[in-house]
Image (cartoon, rainbow, N blue to C red):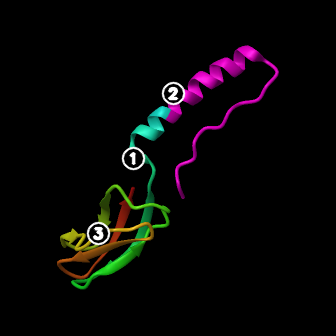
Amino acid sequence: MPLQRIQKLHADNQALVRVADNLRISINRILDSIPFLDGVLAENVALTTATSNVSHKLGRTPVGWLVVDKSADACVWRPSAADATILPLTASAAVTVKVWIF
């Protein structure tokens, strides 16, 4: 699921609206400046020495990816470019991984 930006607060109290606007603007700037936060977790991805296409549902080409958990000692790499729907991955041995794609 893509990152959700903070929306404008609508209230009768104008002081509260100003504080909320300042917070919203600051937080959205932070969210926009750190691509790592706008990602998805692909779980139970079974990899082998053949290339597997991992569907990521970002709706854009990923900036990067990280293996955050793996079931065996194996190296994982991207043998070709990712696109707006898939991240191709290969492993040095059969392994099940969780991948954070951002």
- Mark in the foreground, 3 or 2: 3
Classify residue 92 by image quadrant: bottom left
Disc sitting over residue 81 in the figure? 3
Crowd band around label 2 with a 10 angstrom C-alpha radius: few (<14), some (14–19), many (20+)? few
- Mark in the foreground, 1 or 3: 3
Query: In this figure, which residue is indicated by the disc labeled 2?
Result: 26
| Image side of residue 16 versus residue 101, left or right | right
- Furthest residue to the top? 15
Crowd band around label 1 with a 10 angstrom C-alpha radius: few (<14), some (14–19), many (20+)? some
| Image side of residue 1 versus residue 96, left or right | right
Cα distance between the residues tagged 1 and 3? 18 Å
Residue 54 to residue 20: above or below: below
SS class of the residue under badge 3?
A: loop
**Residue at left offset 24%, top offset 77%:** 90
Disc sitting over residue 43 in the figure? none
Residue 72 to residue 68: above or below: below
Query: Which sits earlier in the primary sequence, circle 1 or circle 3?
Result: 1
**Residue at left offset 38%, top offset 59%:** 62
Q: Amino acid at mark 1?
A: Pro
Disc sitting over residue 35 in the figure? 1
* Residue segment shown in magenta: 1-28
